[in-house]
Image: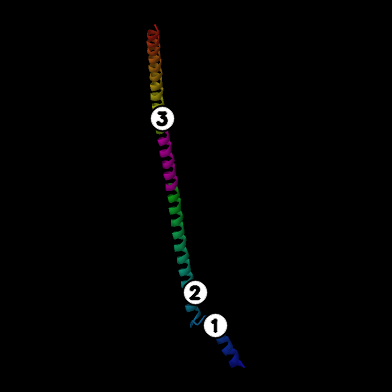
Amino acid sequence: DAGRVLEGIGKSISYDLDGEESYSTYLRRESAQISDAYSSSDRSLSELEGKFRQGQEQGGREEARLGDSFLGLLLHARALLRETRHISSGLRDKHDLLALTVRSHGARLSRLKNDYLR
C-alpha cells in the first residue's frame, strides 16, 4: 500500500511539475513564459500606441488639408465675385454709353425726320 501511495504521490508531483524534473526547473520555465508573455504584451502595447499617434497625426493632416481646401475654395469664390463685380461695372458703363448713343441717334433721326417733313 505504501508503494502505491508513493507512486501516486510521484505521479501527482510529476503532473504538477508538468514534466519537469524539479520544482525549480518548473518555476524557471513558468517565469520565462510569463516574461515572454509580458514582453509580447508590452511590444503590442507599444505598437498600438504608435498606431494611435499615427492616426492622430494623420487626422490632423486631414483636417489641415480640408481647411486648406476650404480656404482655397473661399479665395476662389472671392476672386470670382471680384471679377463679376468688375465685369458688371464694365457692363453698366457700356449700358450707359449705349443708352447715350441710342438717345443721340434718336435725336438725329428725329431731326432728319423733321427736316424731311419740311
Q: Residue at x 37, y 11 (%)?
A: 112
Q: Hey, what amino acid is under mark 1?
A: Tyr
The correct choice, above or below, for 95 with respect to 18 in the image is above
Question: How far separated are the C-alphas under marks 1 and 2?
Answer: 15 Å
Residue interval drawn in magenta: 61-78
Q: Nearer the viewer, residue 82 or 18?
A: 82
Numbered tag placed on residue 118 in the rendering:
none
Tell me the crowding category of disc 3: few under 14, some 14 to 19, or many 20 or more residues within 10 angstroms, Cα based: few
Does 78 sit left or right of 19 as displayed? left
Please identify the quadrant where the N terminus is shown.
bottom right
Tell me the crowding category of disc 2: few under 14, some 14 to 19, or many 20 or more residues within 10 angstroms, Cα based: few
* Label 3 or label 2, whichever comes before in sequence order: 2
The correct choice, above or below, for 109 with respect to 14 in the image is above
Residue at label 2?
A: 30
* Label 1 or label 3, whichever comes before in sequence order: 1
Residue at the extreme top: 118
Residue at label 3?
A: 84
Q: Residue at x 57, y 84 (%)?
A: 12
Please identify the quadrant where the C terminus is shown.
top left
Q: Nearer the viewer, mark 1 or mark 3?
A: 3
Residue at label 1?
A: 15
Q: Position of residue 64 (x, y in %)?
A: 43, 44
